[in-house]
Image: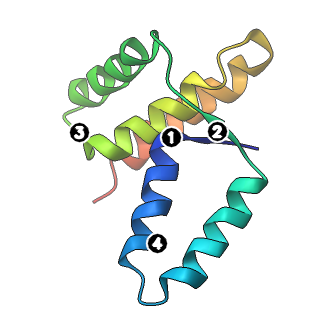
Amino acid sequence: MRISAFAMTELWAAVFLARQSQTEEQRVLNLLDLADPWIPDADFPKAAGSLLADLRRRGRTMTLFDLLIAAAALADSRDADHSRRRRLLRGVVLEAALLP
């Protein structure tokens, strides 16, 4: 399992906001032990920009942080074996942005 740096940031924010931060920290550490981190590369801004443009063409938007997480998921599935998954995921992201 891979997890983006952006999603990890949200997990750590939850730790720092938790009333029982030591318990939450252990939960996050346990999860991260099972995951490989995904760190954006130089092509990432282009992928995120493309997704943002698609959303704006549809008259929609999402928070920047949610956009970065979605774009990271798309960018992490760039090879040919994942092209169907990438199209499906992009469709899910765009449809989710249509929700009220």
Q: Residue at x 66, y 63 (%)?
A: 29
Occupied quadrant, residue 53: top left
Residue pictured at 32% horizontal, 23% vertical = 54
Q: CA distance from mark 3 to mark 2?
A: 29 Å
Q: Which residue type does callout 3 highlight?
A: Arg
Query: Which sits earlier in the primary sequence, circle 1 or circle 3?
Result: 1
Mark 2 / mark 4, whichever is N-terminal: 4
Q: Indicate the amino acid at tag 2.
A: Pro
Most distant residue in the bottom direction: 19
Look at the image and tell me in which quarter the C terminus lies.
Answer: bottom left
**In this rendering, would 32 be left or right of 96?**
right
Secondary element type, mark 1:
helix
**Which residue matches tag 1?**
5
Mark 2–mark 4 distance (CA, rounded to whole Å) = 18 Å
For label 3, the SS is loop
Viewer-proximal residue, 28 or 75?
28
Residue position marked by numbered label 3 in the rendering: 60
Residues tagged 4 and 1 counted as in contact (Cβ below 8 A): no
Sequence-first tag of 3 and 2? 2
Q: Quadrant of residue 17?
A: bottom left
Asked whether the residues under the numbered discs 3 and 2 touch, taking CB atoms below 8 Å apart as contact, a structural biologist would say no
Q: Residues within 10 Å of mark 3 (few under 14, many from 20)?
A: some
Residue 6 in the image, given as x and y percentages of width and height: 45, 43
Measure the C-alpha gap from mark 3 to mark 4.
31 Å
Marks 2/1: CA distance?
A: 6 Å
Say which mark, if any, is on residue 37: 2
How far across and down, in percent of the image, does residue 55 sit? 29, 31
Residue under circle 4?
A: 15
Q: CA distance from mark 1 to mark 3?
A: 25 Å
